[in-house]
Image (cartoon, rainbow, N blue to C red):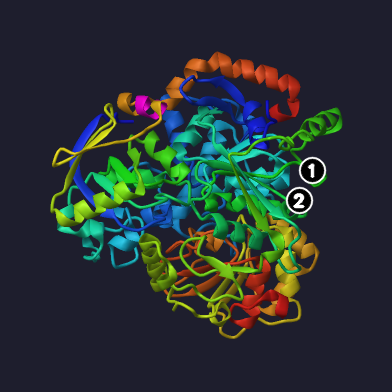
Amino acid sequence: MDKFTQLKAIVAPMDRPNVDTDAIIPKQFLKSIKRSGFGPNLFDEWRYLDHGEPGMDNSQRPINQDFVLNLPRYKGAEILIARENFGCGSSREHAPWALLDYGFRVIIAPSFADIFYNNSFKNGILLIKLDAEVVDQLFKDVAVEDGYELDVNLAEQTITKADGAVIKFDIDEFRKHRLLNGLDDIGLTLQHVDDIKAYEQKRSAQAPWLFV
Amino acid sequence: MPGKTLYDKLWDAHVVRDNGDGTALLYIDRHLVHEVTSPQAFEGLRMAGRKPWRVNANLAVPDHNVPTTDRSKGIEDAVSRIQVETLDSNCSEFGITEFKMDDIRQGIVHVIGPEQGATLPGMTVVCGDSHTSTHGAFGALAHGIGTSEVEHVLATQCLVQKKSNTMLVSVDGKVGPGVTAKDIVLAIIGEIGTAGGTGYAIEFGGEAIRDLSIEGRMTVCNMAIEAGARAGMVAVDDKTIEYVKGRPYAPTAEQWDAAVKEWNELHSDADAKFDTVVHLDAASIQPQVTWGTSPEMVVPVGAKVPDPAGESDAVKSDGMQKALAYMGLTANTPISEIKVDKVFIGSCTNSRIEDIREAAAVAKGRKVADNIKLAMVVPGSGLVKQQAEAEGLDKILLEAGFEWREPGCSMCLAMNADRLEPGERCASTSNRNFEGRQGQGGRTHLVSPAMAAAAAVAGHFVDVRTI
């Protein structure tokens, strides 16, 4: 996974609560056996006017001009602001894969669904939880200024607005450490092979039925 | 020191090491695998030259992409077929037990785990599927994971986890006749909201939960994730142990006795402290119907479609308006006046034998209404189907005009050929009413199997207790 340290980028707004992973990447695209290539189908049912299927040439499909990410002012956005419970629903990691493939590295919302939250960090996406009123102000700021940008610094845990105002954010220390260094979880866990084997030895003596 | 919650006990029994940074390495006893969320994980193993840590901990089954019609010609959709074939080849390459599409034991992953006894009390159970919370019905710690974590479990038999907060949802007293496990869990979600359980592991308790069968408890735990909680669970009691006994993967002889002794401890201590406690009055729960595009948008069948004008929170009110527009509904319409086009009885929430009995009891001697284009019953596994047929339930349903299908996830998420067309309205026993979930433009109303069958025969929603 790519490390994340700092990003100054255009912000796009996704102004609805409970955006679910079915909306982020519809089920027909889950048939892929690859990890990449989901970006063109991010928010497929909202973004295009026709029904999307894997293998279609997305550049030829009719665009929903009203959908927020299709507005020219949000072209190149790498930061998404969203409402409560973003990423609820299915555990599909295709959702963060699609967001990342589209270009988003940071998502800011009042709350995120648990599994989506985990999955995003595993893919180098920084999710930031802020109070609903603070997020609401960001929605207002984005609405009035074309090309609105934020500067996100993970080491400092700050979001800096164009006018210099700074918003601090909290993050679990272990997530921050892994993201700053782009660490691979499996590699880290396999440093503790002896602990895993010791656990198995002890537990299989107590509860052998779990190890058949 | 206060006593432990069930979650504390399950957590403590599985800690391999404390990482010292707020996380622990947690041991995973059972890993269930299906075709949609595993291919990239197996590919990751291959690229790193890794092997499954403990191959027997894994059990695989194709369920999301499988056809529910005649399977003798295989899967018609080439992309779906490749995904199922990829599961077959990965399982064969890594030596993982798989119930293939033509195996009588094939079915929805969350149905077959318990059916086989592969899900046992006290286990940690994970799967690349959010409805893994189902298995918590056995006093297990069970939750969905993403594909990176699927690979992590395959490679290490562990997960890096941060401990959740604990919530007790106590459903006190007894439910009235005709009120099912599905109505209980929909009422809970209506009460705490789809984000109410975020960050929590929920234990369901109270008389109404204890009164439920194990299958009913599975229905409740299945939808813990729709309340935002990755894990839902119910304490072990005699019903749990009776259900598990004699199943293929369950322990036998002296090991059975030792296991039962351990399992009898799997309940929260009387003096355990939960971070949050929610009480619901069982007697006040009515049969439920969702009206919107989130499971929290739910009302009793006797109610009307809510009016966004009555919601003071602007974000919520806007969400309600968007939901009404998508659902093609007008505020203040009585639920019982909403006509449906299709009926789907199935999914990991409601496709077990008791669900099919419940639907058949309503369908018996009645006919599917003329305005219903399709009413389908999709059993959760080949063994559920076989059992239902042995009881003659298939005949009752077929005579009433339902279709009787082969097992799989089917129209819960419409990855196979079963789906809604744009604008079609469905009474569905599944778990999610999200936009496009059952097919682009499709409109889903979540209900119990009895309420779905009642909607099929009436042509519109109706209180099953009145027919």
Image quadrant assignment for residue B182: bottom right
Label 2 secondary element: helix
**Mark 2 lies on residue:** B210
Q: Are marks 2 and 1 in contact (CB under 8 Å)?
A: yes
Of residues B307 and A193, the one nearer the viewer is: B307
> Which residue was labeled with disc 1?
B237
From the top left corner, tell me how far across and down residue B121 is, in percent: 72, 38
Q: Amino acid type of disc 2?
A: Arg
Query: Is residue B274 rendered magenta in the image?
Result: no
The residues colored magenta run: A174-178
Chain of the residue that carries numbered disc 1 in the rendered image: B
Q: Is residue B309 above or below residue B238?
A: below
x and y percent of residue A127 in the render? 35, 40
Name the residue at the bottom extreme. B370
Judged left or right of residue B79, residue B8 is right
The residue positioned 23% from the left and 44% from the top of the image is A78
- Measured in 3D between alpha carbons, the distance from the residue under mark 2 to the one under mark 1, in whole angstroms, is 8 Å
Q: Is residue B201 left or right of residue B319?
A: right
